[in-house]
Image (tube, rainbow, N blue to C red):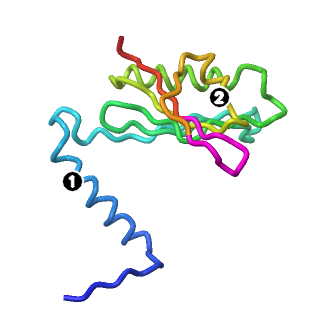
Amino acid sequence: MDFEITKAIDTKEKNYINNLLYEYNLKHFPVDLRGRYEEISLIIKDESGKIHGGILGEICWNWLEIHTLMVEEDIRHLGYGSKLLLEIEKIAKEKNCDFIKVDTLSFQALDFYKKHGYEVFGVLDNVGRDYKHYYLKKDLVL
């Protein structure tokens, strides 16, 4: 049988590949963690409904992963980033997550996450030639 590798895939094909991995992973995780997946999105809006930032993540098995935390520059340093982070940490604890993981670039929010108790567990150098990519984790269960 011959196989070919194609470049273009549609959403259905992409979902099929993700589901193959999901099914494989299920065989290796404890029964009580199977099926634990939930997207979490918290948004900052003004009284007119205009979006000014937010935090996007997902709970997967026993952790919460933050994919995006962004606050518009004109309202930074007003505490909204911290409020978002504290709220998603609260949700992670309520959902019995053991830890939270996040990544950030050296010109983004490394000090912000460290200030909130996140610890670096990995670094990639030479990102965009001049930067570093940091991977951080915060344990919720002590």
Q: Quadrant of residue 116?
A: top right
Residue 71 within the magenta-colored segment of the rendering: no
Q: Residue furthest bottom?
A: 2
Mark nearest the camera among 2 and 1 is 2
Relative to 20, residue 81 above or below: above
Magenta-drawn segment: 124-134
Viewer-proximal residue among 57 and 29: 29
| In this picture, residue 99 sits left or right of residue 36 | right
Residue that appears at 75% across and 32% down: 47
In the image, what residue type sits under mark 1?
Tyr
Residue ranking furthest to the right: 74
> At 75% from the left edge and 33% from the top edge, which residue is drawn?
46
Q: Which residue is mark 1?
A: 24
Q: Which label sits on residue 102?
A: none
In what element is the residue under mark 1? helix
Judging by the rendered image, the residue that carries numbered circle 2 is 110
Residue 134 falls in image quadrant: top right
Q: Is residue 25 above or below residue 57?
A: below
Does 21 appear above or below 74?
below
Q: Is residue 137 left or right of residue 45?
A: left
Does label 2 or label 1 sit earlier along the sequence? 1
